[in-house]
Amino acid sequence: MDRNADAVTISVVVACFDRMGLLRRTLAALAEQVLPAGVIWEVIIADNHPDQLAADTPPMPGLTIRHIPAAPFRNIAAARNRGVEAARGRFVAFLDDDEAPEPECLAQHLAALEASGADASFGPKFPIFEGGAAPGWDPQAHFYTVDFGLAAGAALNPLNWWSASGRGLGTGNAMLRVATCLDAPLPFDETMGRSGGEDSLLFFRLAKQGRRFIWTPSARVVEINQTGRQTAAYMRERLWRSARHSRMARLAVGDNRMLTALGIIGIGLAQVVVHGGLWLLTRGAMRHRFGVAKGLGKLGLGGDLDFIPEPPQG
């Protein structure tokens, strides 16, 4: 990694697989970013498809785009690692290929990190839906929105068992200080490249090392949810996986693996029992169905951790 090349301030890493239409939307939104004078930045497409589908991405005015082949097989952790290796900036911002950052997003993350000295900044995600409306089972899009509702600069800590602030942190809409967060080789565990959760594990490890995370509500992205992601079954799978990822990360960083495991099992059992009972009493209320799924995830039960099957995208 050449951190001095052209004095790059920000490298934006976008990992992609086969959603080329959404990737073009992400790049178009990046082309609209408004950054302070003198800030040099770049976009790195970490192409995770064996056929390198993003290799022919056309140039976009205003963007310095570099295409990086990730791996000969699908592995999201490897894609992110190749993106980090190629990055030349002092800060690395991560975006998913279904996210469109608002024009001030990168500038707000950068300003927050420079003013606070924090190690990582995270911002909210607000959904839009293919077809125009949220699904009928979640008309307010509660389960699709990531917004902690905290003040700017509020501390986030994924290690906190009982606070929602920082729970479920991921690489979608985050900016990290390279010197303190991404200075080690292969920061993302590539053995988790198909199961997911490599970003959760990284943030748990960084928090354990005392790195400081902050909330930046003005750094906003809009996430498009295609039809295949609008079912309750998909959301249940997603929440179950997230709980499994949390379990894996806590076990990996816990000081006492047995006590950590007992704590996770206790919370998981409580979720299954309480939400299971309320699910029956409320005749299948969705939040309780999902609560059971999260409990099963913490218990390490419930299914396969491979990629959630989705139809190919154009």
Image (cartoon, rainbow, N blue to C red):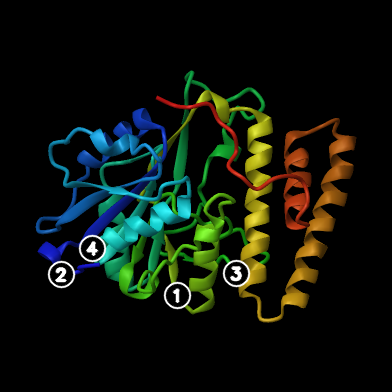
- The residue lying at 60 percent from left, 69 percent from top is 159
> Residue 170 or 313: which is nearer the viewer?
313
Residue 239 at x, y percent in the picture: 65, 45
Query: Could you give the CA–CA distance between mark 2 and mark 1, rounded to whole angstroms?
Result: 24 Å
- The residue lying at 36 percent from left, 75 percent from top is 180
Tell me the quarter of the picture where residue 304 sits.
top right
Residue ID for mark 1: 211
Residue ID for mark 2: 4
Whether residues under marks 3 and 2 lie with C-beta atoms below 8 angstroms apart, the answer is no
Q: Nearer the viewer, mark 2 or mark 1?
A: 2
Counting residues from the start of the chain, the first of labels 4 and 2 encountered is 2
Query: Could you give the CA–CA distance between mark 4 and mark 1, rounded to whole angstroms?
Result: 19 Å
The amino acid marked with disc number 2 is Asn
Q: Nearer the viewer, mark 4 or mark 1?
A: 4
Counting residues from the start of the chain, the first of labels 2 and 1 encountered is 2
The amino acid marked with disc number 4 is Gly
Counting residues from the start of the chain, the first of labels 4 and 1 encountered is 4
Residue 172 at x, y percent in the picture: 44, 49
Counting residues from the start of the chain, the first of labels 3 and 4 encountered is 4
Q: For this view, does 167 lie left or right of residue 264?
A: left
Q: Residue furthest front?
A: 72
Residue 54 at x, y percent in the picture: 30, 37
Above or below residue 299? Residue 224 is above
Residue ID for mark 3: 159
Query: Callout 3: 10 Å neighbours few (<14), some, many (20+)?
Result: many
Residue ID for mark 4: 89
